[in-house]
Structure formats: C-alpha cells, structure tokens
Image (cartoon, rainbow, N blue to C red):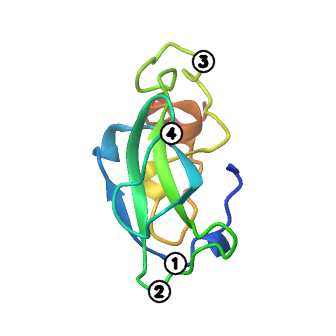
Amino acid sequence: MSSMLQDSQLTDEVEVVWLEDPADLDYVRQALDKVHTRRGRPRYERDGRLIGFTNLKAGAASDPDSGLFARRTFFLLPHDRDNDPAGPYEVGAPGEAVDPRTIEPGKVGAKTPRSQKGRAADVAPAGR
C-alpha cells in the first residue's frame, strides 16, 4: 500500500461506491488493495471502517503473478478526526488522507485545506 498513488494506477476504475455519505467527512484514507474481484464490496481487514471502494471495468486485467485486482478502498481508523475530533488529527491528516469531495474514478483524490487542517479551514476568515 502506498499513499502516493498515481492516476496511471487507476485507469481501469469505472465507479466509486460510497458505503457512507462522505459529504460530512473532512478526509478519508485511500489505499490500493489487492482483491479477488473487479466489482462489489471487497474484504476489509483493517481496524476502523470501510467508507467506500472502486469498481473496475469488465476487461480489467488481474496481476499475472497473483491473479488479484488492484482496487482503491476508502477508510477511516478509530483515531481519525471524525471519531476523535480532539485527537492526533485535530489539525493535519495522515499521509494517505484525501478530501472525499475530490475523489472520482481514475483520479487520485486531492489534499485540500479541509482535509489537511480540518473543518475550521472552511470557515476561517481570509488572511489567517
């Protein structure tokens, strides 16, 4: 898993599926996971919760060595800002965190002031 994803790794994505409404989340973590299927909810084996995932096009190739498909998952851990607003990510965010409002198929999500500094970045007066 690398937090430094490239659009070139996501060319087979056709859909982002949200299991939770991401509108109220400052950030989600994104990872490129190896899974057995092109579509549907992938197995989730981390602490925390799965927020969403991508589906791949019908012709997407699997890895020739493992037979697995590379698909993005979007998740949050128990110590992330939504669960623990005054915790370690009250300000700042983990390296793989992106603003869910910037996620679309085939495009790496972006870091924004909201994802990196928290909701306060959206309401801070100009010049601060």
Amino acid type, callout 3: Pro
Dot 2 or dot 4: first in sequence order is 2
Residue under circle 3? 88
Residue at horizontal 52%, vertical 72%? 106
Residue at horizontal 56%, vertical 41%? 113
Q: Camera-side residue: 32 or 103?
A: 32
Amino acid type, callout 4: Arg
Q: Quote the CA–CA distance across marks 2 and 4.
A: 36 Å
Residue under circle 2? 59
Circles 1 and 4: CB atoms closer than 8 Å: no
Dot 1 or dot 4: first in sequence order is 1
Q: Is residue 82 left or right of residue 46?
A: left
Q: Quote the CA–CA distance across marks 3 and 4.
A: 16 Å
Residue under circle 1? 12
Q: Quote the CA–CA distance across marks 1 and 2.
A: 8 Å
Look at the picture and state if 78 lies above or below 18: above
Amino acid type, callout 1: Asp
Which secondary structure, mark 2?
loop
Residue under circle 4? 114
Look at the picture and state if 124 lies above or below 72: above
Neighbours of disc 2 within 10 Å: few (<14), some (14-19), many (20+): few
Which secondary structure, mark 4?
helix
Residue 5 location (% of width, % of height): 67, 59
Q: Camera-side residue: 2 or 110?
A: 2
Dot 3 or dot 1: first in sequence order is 1
Which secondary structure, mark 3?
loop
Residue 98 location (% of width, % of height): 55, 47
Q: Nearer the viewer, mark 2 or mark 4?
A: 2
Amino acid type, callout 2: Gly
